[in-house]
Image (spheres, rainbow, N blue to C red):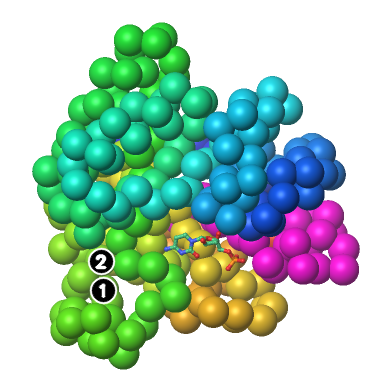
Amino acid sequence: MLRPQLKPEERIILALDFPEHEIAINWVEKLRSKIKTFKVGSILFLDSGSEGLKEFSNLSVEVFLDLKFHDIPSTVEITARQSVRFGANMFTIHTLGGFEMMKRTSEAVKEEAEKLSYPKPLVLGVTVLTSHDKKSLEKIGISTSTEDTVMNLAALAEKANIDGLVCSGVEVEALRKEFGDRFTLVVPGIRPGTANHDQKRVTTPEEAISAGADYLVIGRAITEADNPEEIVDEIVTSIS
Ligand code: C5P
């Protein structure tokens, strides 16, 4: 998998972390001239559902389905097939689900997309959540460093033929060094000088892109801004 060729404005993914479909649709309409990909996570999916996904696609935007599937291999395989059917352009699974789960998912997605003649969505493996740091990983029994944990999970994802990884900007350089252009790298925890909220391993848009990130997932830094359009323009300029 080679890295996608993207213009600066195509690198921003807006996280639609809203509890109501109508609010999310308003944001898509407001920003779709500036942003191409919109992320539907669990907060929105419980209201929007699969019908909502189709509505986003009908607005001619790309849909990133971020439900971070983490279950036994057969359950995730079938869920992945559903994700293809409902038109996701990219979706996430947890690499912590293990090799078998990731491999069955990547094979199923390819097969399902071919069967339906749909474009194959990117399967993205979440490595270590950006809200974790060394201390919080230790509390759940992971004593290797955050970077080593990310690198181990990435090696497993590579063997399982996963297209891309979700990681923090802090690990991008090491991942590029080890895996070159093999993965599409999607980076949340982006803070262009705004509050960190619950995120720990944060980077600015410029830091993440110059380290080798492909996409930046940005939520509150845009949606809580007084003038969201202006912030988007500033971010695009900073990574151009
Ligand atoms: O508002 P903020 O920019 O922190 O939003 C980040 C988004 O990225 C949220 O929707 C969150 O669920 C998602 N995400 C993350 N860390 C990951 C994977 C996804 O923050 N490792």
Which residue type does callout 1 highlight? Glu
Dot 1: within a 10 Å radius of its alpha carbon, few (fewer than 14), some, or many (20 or more) residues?
some
Residue 86, numbered label: none
Which portion, as a residue range, is magenta? 213-233
Which residue type does callout 2 highlight? Val
Which secondary structure lies at badge 1?
helix
Relative depth, front residue between 72 and 83: 72
Q: Relative to 70, does residue 64 appear above or below in the rendering?
A: above
Image location (x, y in percent) of residue 161 = 20, 38
User: Is residue 141 visible to us here?
Assistant: yes
- Residue appearing at x 32%, y 67% in the figure: 128
Residue 147, numbered label: 1
State if disc 2 and disc 1 touch (CB < 8 Å).
Answer: yes
| Residue assigned mark 2 | 150
Dot 2: within a 10 Å radius of its alpha carbon, few (fewer than 14), some, or many (20 or more) residues?
many
Write down the quadrant of residue 56 in the picture: top right
Q: Quadrant of the N terminus?
A: top left
- Residue appearing at x 34%, y 27% in the figure: 81
